[in-house]
Image: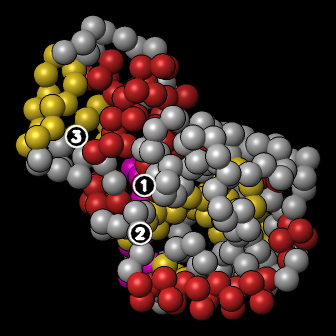
Amino acid sequence: MKQLAPTIILCTITLSLLFTTCSGKDDSKHLFKEGTTVAERVLVPHGYVRESTTAGTWQHYLQSLKLLPHGSEVLDFQGRPISDQRNHFAVMDIDVGTKDLQQCADATIRLRAEYLYQRKEFDKIKFQFTSGHSYAWLDHAKGIRPEVKGNKVEFKQSSTSDYSYQNFRRYLDIVFMYAGTISLERELNKVNRGGDYQIGDVIVHPGSPGHAVIIVDRAKNSKGEYIYLLAQGYTPAQSIHIVKSHDRGISPWFDLPKKLPIWHERFFFKNPQVRRFV
């Protein structure tokens, strides 16, 4: 997300005051400081049960993401703390890189790519550019590189084969450069907002600027109602972090609406699109 329109900024500021007033210190009730993963660090509110997931699945991977120690700051790509340290609950133990590339949609792409790489499902690691062209990790590993001129993209053999993790990171930086919320929204499967969202679903506002957050956990009460944990990257490129909802009694968990816009101090989805990896 590059910048927000003035009207959105005004609404966000107004709502941020509301959230701050309502949030109190509820966050601390759902914190286990010694926890090293999402599922260990973030406790569920009273009356809710965390979803049990199967080892090896996308959902379990997200619940098991490693976190930096409690109290860690969100850092930008230059290693500097960002100005807003009030709205994150935990920081993921994932590098940002040294360039201003791993932003909002890119954070989601990074998580998905790392999951598939860990699973050795290398043939599934491919992402679309905003131009619509798809770029696969295995092609990059073989030395194929994109040449981008406007919306014209050509793929040419221009390097030697390299299947190392270091080269995988270079592949992702290329994807971050040419992919974004528009391509992410277009590439993933549409989810009906009237139903329940799943761990791994992406809430996205496609555009320039746009924004995307990903559901990394969920819990359910006796009525069958779900609450969710959201994670995001941001602009400038910065640590992927779990966002505080500031919802009274359940923060950092979100009670996501199924029809209305989604408001938060750090993002605003007027007409949220929900998408799912296959």
Q: What stretch is highlighted in magenta?
A: 269-278
At label 3, the amino acid type is Ser
How far apart in space, not on screen, are marks 2 and 3 (Cα)? 27 Å
State the image quarter where residue 85 is shown: bottom right
Q: Which residue is drawn at 42% across and 44% down?
A: 101
Q: Is mark 1 on a helix, strand or loop?
A: helix
Viewer-side label of 2, 3: 2
Q: Residue at x 61, y 89 (%)?
A: 15
Q: What element carries label 2?
A: loop
Q: Is residue 271 visible?
A: yes
Labelled disc at residue 3: 2
In this view, the residue in front, 13 or 278, is 13
How far apart in space, not on screen, are marks 1 and 2 (Cα)? 14 Å
At label 2, the amino acid type is Gln
At label 1, the amino acid type is Ala
Say left or right for 168 vs 199. Answer: left
In this view, the residue in front, 147 or 82, is 82
